[in-house]
Each structure stands twice: as C-alpha cells, then as structure tokens.
Image: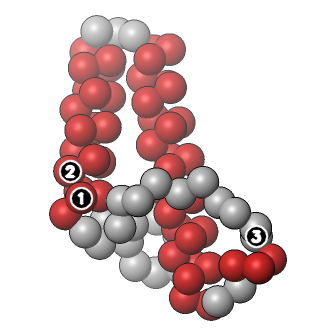
Amino acid sequence: MHFIRYPGTTLSTRKRWDHVLKEHEELLVAIRARNAEEAGRIASAHMDEAKNIRIQIYIDGREISHLWGSLQVPDLY
C-alpha cells in the first residue's frame, strides 16, 4: 500500500530495508506452509509498522507531534 497523499517511502534507510526483507521472507514461509493465521499476523504487523512510520514521517515533517503524543515507532529510519 502506498499513500498517494503523502508521497515518498518508509524504505529510506538500509536498516528498514533489511527489516522489511526479513518480514517478507517470513510471510512467504507462512504462505508456502499454508499457515493463513501466521501469514495474516505477519502481514498485519508489517502494515501497522509501515503506517506508524508513515505517521511519524508526517509528524516530523510538519512539526505537529504535540497533537499525537507519544507514538510507538521502531527506530528503523
């Protein structure tokens, strides 16, 4: 999923790329094993993390962090 309203990518650093590649590998393992529950968990966690990073990028860029409070965003960018 790519947010057209907020162009750019959450994959702006090597650390994030490495983490995402690991998540995708785990997702493929679950899919090949036909483990829908595990695949769903991995995919959902991946999208939640990307969403949180996207929100933090927006907050950092617009300097409105006081409106959101403290987000739990991993140090991946």
Mark number, residue 68: 3
> Residue 23, relative to residue 77: is it above or below?
above
* Residue at the farthest bottom position: 62
Question: Do the numbered discs 3 and 1 sit on residues whose CB atoms are within 8 Å?
Answer: no
Q: How far apart are marks 2 and 1 (CA)?
A: 5 Å
Q: Distance between the residues labelled 3 and 1?
A: 25 Å
Label 2: few (<14), some (14–19) or many (≥20) C-alpha neighbours in 10 Å? few
Residue 4 in view here:
no
The image quadrant where one finds the C terminus is bottom left
Q: Residue at 50% of width from left, 63% of height from top?
A: 53
Q: In screen coordinates, is 52 left or right of 36?
A: right
Image position, residue 5 (x, y; %): 58, 80
> Residue 66, relative to residue 55: is it above or below?
below
Badge 1 element: helix
Dot 1 amino acid type: Lys
Q: Mark 1 points at which residue?
A: 15
Dot 3 amino acid type: Trp
